[in-house]
Image: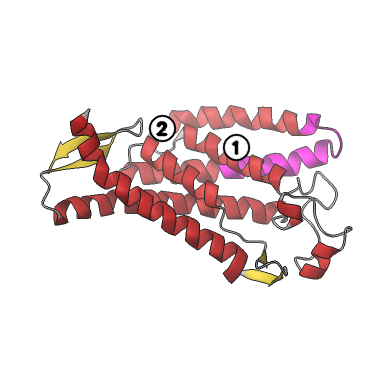
Amino acid sequence: MREKMRAALPLAIVVGVIAYAWTHFAFNFTFHWFTAGDLGNGLELPRNFQLIVPAGFVGWGFFFAAGADNRAIVKVATGVLSGGLAALATIALSSTTADFPDFWGIALWVGVFSVPLVLLGAFDEWLSVPASFGAFASVFFYWIATGLDFWFPSGGGGPNTVAALADPTTAGTGAFGGVISMPYGWMWFSISVSMLCGILLGVASVRLTGLVTGLFGRGDQAIVDGDGSAQPQRV
């Protein structure tokens, strides 16, 4: 146990630093830098494209779970893209099948698209099914949080301006008082990009851990098993 803790320490420190940097950057990007007007409370109205902090961590976690190597980059990236596209199709088709207030159309297409996501497991050398389901769930969850645009009338809000936010007819119905409401297409794109950023965060954490252990002249460094645990390895 002590040896495992010692081996995992450089990785844990690097992950902590990168987690801080990602959270700080993504929040500032969304609420201070890439914005559409002053909200009058110290924040600004996010544009339709946003960096979603939790989605980055989801992509990062799946990279570790897939083995944290070069093959994991491909498997998780294809999983993110396939799962995200399945969720996008679910939103579009369920909304045309049965709109507000009937949920059965949503439930129907969630069930339908779960089938091909599992069948994609036949290509497990190139695609991570858990990452596909994670991407599907992330897009679907954020669709709910941002107002169920296209299923619920004006769920994504109207014009992305402070004036539209102040008008109850165009404000959107998402969480955070409608501030993060966005059209479902942009919501899918924001989640997908943020999850792909998470893969890059995972790559950076592994590479920087190797650099840190090398700089300190350690004879061992942490590698990440498929279950996400760190194990010592001689280098």
Q: Nearer the viewer, residue 199 or 213?
A: 213
Q: Nearer the viewer, residue 201 or 16?
A: 16
| Residue at image mark 1 | 137
Q: Position of residue 68 (x, y in %)?
A: 33, 42
Q: Which residue is mark 2?
A: 124
Amino acid type for the residue under numbered disc 1: Ala
| Left or right side of 29 for 170 | right
Q: Is residue 93 magenta?
A: yes
Is residue 215 toward the left or the right of residue 138 in the image? left
Q: Secondary structure at mark 2?
A: loop
Query: Label 2 amino acid?
Result: Asp
Q: Is residue 171 above or below residue 79?
A: below
Quadrant containing the C terminus is top left
The magenta stretch spans which residues? 83-105
Label 2 environment density (alpha carbons within 10 Å; few <14, some 14–19, many ≥20): few
x and y, in percent, of residue 1 in the image: 22, 27
- For the stretch drawn in magenta, what is the main secondary structure? helix
At x 48%, y 32%, the residue is 130
Q: Is residue 14 left or right of residue 123?
A: left
> Residue 27 got which mark?
none
In the foreground, 63 or 128: 63
Q: Quadrant of residue 169?
A: bottom right
Q: Earlier in the sequence, mark 1 or mark 2?
A: 2
The residue that appears at 52% across and 53% down in the rendered structure is 194
Q: Nearer the viewer, residue 211 or 73?
A: 211
**Residue at figure coordinates x 60%, y 54% from the top left:** 189
Q: Secondary structure at mark 1?
A: helix
